[in-house]
Image (spheres, rainbow, N blue to C red):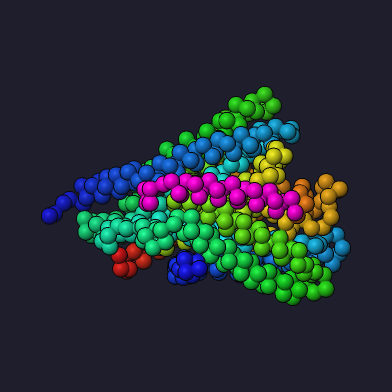
Amino acid sequence: MSVSSGRKITQILGAELDKLVTLPWIWLTLIGTFILNLVLAAAFTAVGLQGAVGTQSMLNIGLASMRYLQAGFIILGILATCSEYTGGQIRTTLITIPWRGFQLSTKHLALALITIPAAVIIAASGVLYTFIRMRDTAVGFEIDKMIEALLGATGYLILTTLLSAAIGAILRRTTPALVVLLGYYFVVSPLSRDFLSRFKKYFPDTAGYYMYIPPSPDEINVLTPMEGTGILMLWTLIFITVAIVFYRKRDA
Amino acid sequence: MRAFNAELSKLFSLPSIWLAFLIGAFAPAVVAALDSIAQKEEIIAGISTRLSEVGYIGLGFGVQGVIILGVLAVSSEYLTESSESGGGQQITTSLTVVSSRLHFLLAKACAVTLISILLCIVAMMTIVPTTHFILGEYAPAFEWSRLIGAVCYWTFTALLAFGITLLTKNGIIPLAVLIINSSVVSFSVLLSKISRLAFYLPDRAGLEMFMFTSDTFHTPSTGSFFDRFHTPFTGGLVMFAWVAVFFIIAAIVFHRRDVAA
């Protein structure tokens, strides 16, 4: 059957979106992340209210839960690609869509489409909560700074999700992928901050960190949000490329 | 006893279990080495405030090995096989062979406990030479009480992971929550800044069994990672209470639940 390539893309994208939307775990993860984020925002706000705050620190407090929040998006990315390998769905997928590189790229695209609204809502809800609670204590609040930070946070979450999806596609099993990624983001990375301070800012999570945290004057050599975005995007693209190369070579 | 052997053999044949062993046995030494290097200058200058616990922080992170172990022990039973090989779950076979559910659960828990204890001893044996190698005479002395505390912490954490996974039947949630919570950015540490009740959370209380052994009870702001709240013994009791509660709930739920649903 010959189908025009434009139509092919829409059909594959539709199929990938359909698969993602019907995964119950995706919804559980998103809802769980949303609730967790509100709880954490409440916790950070409670800590923040104990001290005096200005505009800068209010944004920081609102985005402080991002550290934990990214776990939900990492899980999302891993689930999206690893779910193909549980129960042999991958073979059905490849019979219907025999263009492997094409299929995996479309999967990442579909994942990005789902992540965008989720990331916006979840990141904004945390900042909004902090804003409502701390409105009286913070003075001279700038809305454009907040929008900038929110855009950065959304971009960071999307890129992190895609990065996790690529790693999931390389490792193909949920548990090792989860352990490797969570271990890196939550244990290795914070621990190695003191030892590799010169190279640290080029690592995916630290580069991404500068996407949403406004640069503070007391840190030298920090990246601008644009540089941070570029580096994280480069990492993501590298991992996606590696995943596609492996995917094309490997047995299903 | 045969059920116990079977559980051990099932655990050892899991491919992902080697990840758990690797993390449990070697990660503590790596963290200890990094921590010792970072602290060395301060110790020689005599301004270090956490002299007696340098390196042992590795045990707090290496615990992730046994978290994986506890989670995998249960979640592997519930993993659905591919539809091409029947779409079955191992739990059906396991419960056909060992028909008493409590018996099955105890055998599994014992297997997890045994491996955690061994893994913790290995971790301790890698930490002590590492700190001695880097710090020389400044290395904190090896204490048996600390080994016992660390073993208890690891075992309880593994059983906690075991109990939670038994309730969720899927490894993702317990793995994510427990790994994040045993890291630097733990929820419990955050919560303990808000409410004193958070000191009674299992990981926060359990850590006191082997960390913070320097007697900093009366000085509120020390250089230690956290301030001390419980004595090692009460910390252990608090954590044990959590494990017992989770385990009993999980056992009751498991007993009443349909096999694989």
Is there any visible trace of residue A198 in the rendered image?
no
- Expressed as whole percent of the image width and height from the top left, the position of residue A251 reads 30, 68
Query: Image point 32% across, 58% down: which residue?
Result: B88
Q: Nearer the viewer, residue A239 or A178?
A: A178
Picture layout, residue B230 above or below residue B119: above
Work out whether B161 lies above or below A196: above
Is residue B250 placed above or below B213 in the rendered structure? above
B256 falls in the magenta region: yes
Foreground residue among B114 and B56: B114
Magenta-tinted stretch: B233-261
Residues A79 and B200: in front is B200
Q: Position of residue B62 (x, y in %)?
A: 62, 62
Where is residue A121? Give x, y as percent. Answer: 47, 35
Q: Is residue B216 visible?
A: yes
Along the line of sight, which residue is nearer the eye, A52 or B105? B105
Furthest-left residue in this view: A1
Does the segment drawn in magenta span residue B177? no
Residue located 68% across and 44% down the image: B200
Relative placement, left or right, of A76 versus B40 is: left
Q: Is residue B153 left or right of residue B41?
A: left
Name the main secondary structure of what is drawn in magenta.
helix
Task: Give the image quarter of residue B59.
Answer: bottom right
Q: Residue at x 68, y 73 (%)?
A: B125
- Which quarter of the figure has residue B152? bottom right
Most distant residue in the top direction? A136
